[in-house]
Image (cartoon, rainbow, N blue to C red):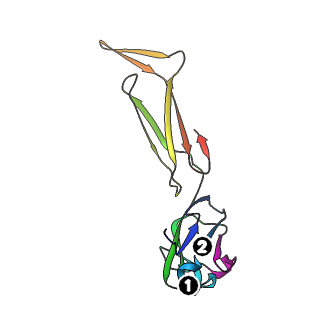
């Protein structure tokens, strides 16, 4: 049986800019022999080492405090729950936006099965996934241009981008 010192819940938060979330830190009193309680707990930003303002902390009971993150600014950081100088729990917080439109979208097809597309992915703290799908126009439109003895065929393709993250699914 493993005794934990303390834990934070949840261990990961992903929210929209200006959103709110709560992180709890619960101390296992048995681990400290009853010598510590929730008044020794606090949160710090891992990257700056700065303690979060005490007016954002609520003491729930002898074992638990809650950090209330309100009107969150864009960030990608860890918050560490500490008792005195000892780190006892970590929660990763990512604050970003719903998927944004891509820019500079261009595709080139070399044959009927191989299509290369390029675009600029907008910056976003939240992990965003982009899936591309394409189909030929129905019925297929072909334009033949005769230059010298060669024939060139153009096929118009419909390309769809689906961008998604924890906040939203965007079909472009």
User: What residue does disc 2 label?
Assistant: 25
> In the displayed structure, would residue 3 be above or below residue 155?
below
* Local crowd size for mark 2, using a 10 Å CA cut-off: few (<14), some (14–19), many (≥20): many
What label does residue 7 carry, if any? none
- Percent across and percent down for residue 101 are 56, 45
Q: Is residue 63 on the magenta stretch?
A: yes
User: What residue does disc 1 label?
Assistant: 33
- In the image, the segment drawn in magenta is 53-68
Q: Residue at x 47, y 73 (%)?
A: 47
- Percent across and percent down for residue 82 are 53, 79
- Percent across and percent down for residue 70 are 67, 68
Q: Nearer the viewer, residue 85 or 28?
A: 28
Asked which quadrant contains residue 59, the reply is bottom right
Asked which quadrant contains residue 55, the reply is bottom right
Q: Is residue 59 on the magenta stretch?
A: yes
Q: Nearer the viewer, residue 97 or 62?
A: 62
Residue 69 in the figure: left or right of residue 89: right
Q: Earlier along the polypeptide chain: callout 1 or callout 2?
A: 2
Element at badge 2? strand
Instruction: Name the outermost residue toward the left.
Output: 149
* Local crowd size for mark 1, using a 10 Å CA cut-off: few (<14), some (14–19), many (≥20): few
User: How many numbered tags mark residues here?
Assistant: 2
């Amino acid at each position: 049986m493993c005794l934990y010192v303390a834990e934070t819940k949840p261990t990961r938060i992903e929210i929209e800019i200006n959103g709110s979330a709560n992180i709890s830190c619960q101390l296992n009193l048995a681990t400290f022999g009853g010598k510590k309680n929730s008044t020794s707990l606090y949160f710090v930003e891992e990257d700056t080492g700065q303690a979060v303002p005490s007016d954002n902390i609520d003491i729930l009971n002898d074992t638990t405090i809650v950090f209330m993150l309100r009107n969150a600014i864009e960030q990608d950081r860890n918050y560490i729950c500490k008792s005195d100088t000892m780190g006892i729990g970590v929660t990763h917080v990512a604050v970003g936006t719903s998927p944004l439109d891509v820019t500079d979208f261009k595709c080139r097809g070399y044959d009927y099965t191989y299509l290369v597309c390029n675009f600029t992915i907008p910056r976003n703290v939240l992990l965003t996934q982009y899936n591309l799908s394409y189909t030929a126009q129905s019925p297929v439109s072909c334009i033949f241009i005769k230059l010298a003895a060669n024939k060139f065929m153009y096929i118009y393709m419909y390309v769809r981008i689906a961008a998604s993250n924890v906040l939203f699914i965007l079909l472009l």
